[in-house]
Amino acid sequence: MNECGNVKSKSDIKIKMPKKYKVIMHNDDYTSMEFVIEVLVKIFGKSVPEATKIMYEVHENGHGIAGIYSFDIAKTKALEAMSIAEGEGLPFNLTVEEE
């Protein structure tokens, strides 16, 4: 109900969109370009050409955006990628930041 005691109409209701979060890949001197592409394809669902483009962005700029998701999905994908890297003995790092 609104302040006059009336039931709110659809036009009175404001829908707040959920926040989105960027998964950012960071460059290092040890993780191979092939590994980065593989992670982008398998975990982030990128095509090979798109993954290659992102990998070069990471390589040239020191970081690149792997994807933009809700917080839970972004965090899960980042942790999954870092877990695989850790299993391979790589220092690959991803962070999650609000868009």
Image (tube, rainbow, N blue to C red):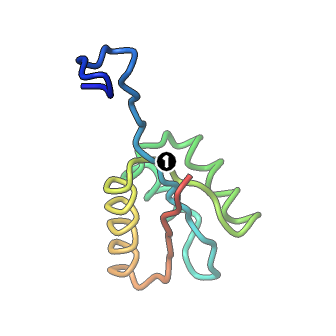
> Residue 25 in the image: x percent, y percent?
56, 65
Q: Which residue is mark 1?
A: 68
For residue 31, which quarter of the picture? bottom right
Q: Residue furthest front?
A: 4
Quadrant in which the N terminus is drawn: top left
> Residue 75 in the image: x percent, y percent?
36, 62
> Residue 26 in the image: x percent, y percent?
60, 71
Q: Could you tell me which secondary element the residue under label 1 belongs to? A: strand
For residue 61, which quarter of the picture? bottom right
Q: Residue furthest right?
A: 60
Q: Residue at x 50, y 76 (%)?
A: 92
Above or below, 67 relative to 10: below
Name the one closer to the observer, 17 or 70. Answer: 17
Q: Residue at x 31, y 61 (%)?
A: 76
Q: Residue at x 70, y 65 (%)?
A: 59
Q: Residue at x 37, y 51 (%)?
A: 42
- Kind of residue at badge 1: Ile
User: From the viewer's perspective, is 86 left or right of 30?
Assistant: left
Q: Residues within 10 Å of mark 1 (few under 14, many from 20)?
A: some
Name the one closer to the observer, 49 or 45. Answer: 45
Name the one closer to the observer, 71 or 60. Answer: 71
Name the one closer to the observer, 62 or 98. Answer: 98
